[in-house]
Amino acid sequence: MTRRPTTPRLGLGVGMDLPWGERIGFTRDPGRGDTVTPRVANFLARYQERFHYLVFAFQPGNRNRLRAGDYFAAYDALFAAAPRIGHRALHHTLLNMATLEPIEFDAVAAFTNALVERYGFAWIVEDLGLWSIAGKSLPYPLPPFLTDEGLAACIRNVRGWQSRLAAPVCVEFPGFTEGATITIGAMDAFEFFRVVADETGSPVTLDVGHLLSYQWSQGRVGPRRFEALERLPLLACHEIHLSGCQISGGKFRDLHHGVLLDEQLELLAWLLPRCPHLRAITYEDPRYFEDGELVPKSVANFERLAAMAAAWLGEEAHA
């Protein structure tokens, strides 16, 4: 059954990739137990009032078992560090929506639904990609097979998760960054994604960096980066992601380093009036120092993004 998020326009949110054992992420503290690192806590203390929701990416703390209770202490600590952020969502990494292999739904669904019950996630999002092959996790998700078989598998898998998960499932347009992914199949990725959205009724997430990475792969650079975007399922768009990207040597890099390109904000400006059901704009993977302060190179365009999101949010308030 297709579920759609029921939230009003939320404005600007923060997306966080929080691996275990890194300076930005979760840690196992001998005295306090599982918790967020001081750097994460300091960032949230400084900036939580700037964000209306928090979405974080699931990272396994233990690859030998999948038990929701193993994550409660860490996730409790994360949300306790940001008490003023009222809405929460989960960026999954275990759904593997583009796989051609049979999916063992039950264990991941039970794990996820236990988290939904405890934390009230308003939606669950995952890139429409291959996150693992033959049980082996990939360092970066690969785009789906752009073939008839790949399309049928994506539709089948999305429907499978929709029927099993207790929160609405958003499907995210995948990345096509040169050097990090490979593309198999000749179907147009925008059309492919639109068909998945149409056939499943799923709300979608549009990652601006992912869109630009595909445009670059098709030679649509400079002024041409706005071409063909109307093929996307814009009316189904629930969320837009923006993460730090870079153009170097004529190549587009989706680096998640916190520094937004002008081109990303220009594409956001193009999308906003064309996505009437948009509810959330996510600044994904900010980068900050130990005291929680954003890295200086990221500040100017973060503030531009925040102003755009505030203006967009204000449109609904005055409608």
Image (cartoon, grey):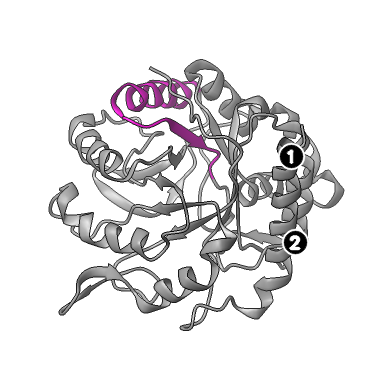
The residue type indicated by label 2 comes to Arg
Which residue lies most toward the right here?
223
Please say if 3 is above or below 179.
Answer: above
**Residue 85 pos. (x, y %):** 47, 55
Please say if 53 is above or below 250.
Answer: above
Q: Which residue is more in the foreground, 216 or 209?
A: 209
Side of 151 relative to 265 (left or right): left
Span colored in magenta: 148-174
Q: Which mark is residue 272?
A: 1
Q: Which mark is residue 217?
A: none
What is the number of callouts on the image?
A: 2
Q: Which residue is more in the foreground, 94 or 149?
A: 94
The residue type indicated by label 1 comes to Leu
Q: CA distance from mark 2 to mark 1?
A: 14 Å
Q: Quadrant of the N terminus?
A: top left
Whether 166 is among the magenta residues is yes
Q: Which residue is more in the foreground, 310 or 96?
A: 310
Whether 274 is among the magenta residues is no
The residue that disc 2 covers is 304
Q: Of marks 2 and 1, which one's residue comes earlier in the chain?
A: 1
**Residue 309 pos. (x, y %):** 69, 50
**Residue 216 pos. (x, y %):** 70, 50
